[in-house]
Image (cartoon, helix red, strand yellow):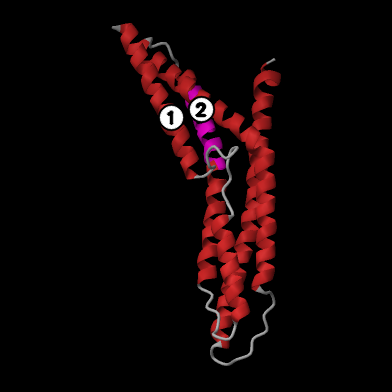
Amino acid sequence: LVTSSFILPHMIQFTVISFYYVLVLMVVGVLKNINEQMKSIYCSNRVNAQFIKVEKIITLNQIEVVYVHMLEMKREINRAFQASILATAIQCFHSIVSESHILYHGLVVEHTLTTHDVCNCSIWIVYQLIKIYIISCSGSMLKEQVSKIGRSLHNILPGKDDARLYLEVQHFSSMILYQNAEMTVYDFFPLDATFTFNVISAAVMYIVMLVQFDATKKS
């Protein structure tokens, strides 16, 4: 009964989070390659300024097409996992609050917790924090790579006679500015570093409220 109702669901949950993390890492890996191509274009333009002919392997327009495909993949990943991530966030929040309150109540109020109980509750809290961190870390890495691409794009200096490259840089910059690259949960909140902060701060607030209730009852 414990295996089917407790252990198995949490194994499935962690597998889903791991799969989500790997998919986001794949997108981040492609974005890293895009950033490297941006740097190569920047370097080739500097060489061209010295009147040396350089053959470009890939154009900025082709890089933009790959970037658009990565945004579409990001949206598909977001749509596929946002429901499970929302359920995970609720479960992690509830577990952090309840386990922390059990620790406080058992150690301070009733003095009934054993060393095994303390270790069990502590490990369970750390497990919830790890899941929250994995979700936040994936979104933060995605935003960081998009920011790096934007900085590399602004380092590309088209020549006076290269009007086409100038327009491509403008178009790419506008798309990065207006296309949302964040992972969100139904557009309610982003899945980045602020996600960890919001969950932990809300959990701490509720724990303080529960401690105050215990203190009121005790008095």
Residue located at (57% from left, 60% from top): 176
Label 1 belongs to which residue?
Answer: 202
Q: Which mark is residue 93?
A: 2
Crowding at dot 2, Cα within 10 Å, few <14 / some 14-19 / many 20+, comes out as many
Q: Distance from label 1 to label 2 (Cα)?
A: 8 Å
Answer left or right for 24 relative to 101: right
Mark closer to the chain start, 1 or 2: 2
The furthest residue to the left: 219
SS at circle 1? helix
Image x and y of residue 139, in percent: 56, 47
Residues at discs 1 and 2 in contact (Cβ within 8 Å): yes
What's the residue type where badge 2 is placed? Phe
Magenta span dominant secondary structure: helix
The answer to whether residue 47 is seen in the rendering is yes
Whether residue 160 appears in magenta in the rendering, the answer is: no
Image quarter of the C terminus = top left
Q: Give the residues drawn in magenta, as a range.
A: 119-135
Image x and y of residue 133, in percent: 52, 40
The furthest residue to the bottom: 51
SS at circle 2? helix
Whether residue 125 appears in magenta in the rendering, the answer is: yes
Please name whichever residue, 90 or 134, is drawn nearer the observer in this view of the structure.
90
Please name whichever residue, 126 or 197, is drawn nearer the observer in this view of the structure.
197
Quick check: 91 above or below 164? above
Image x and y of residue 187, in percent: 57, 40
The answer to whether residue 119 is seen in the rendering is no
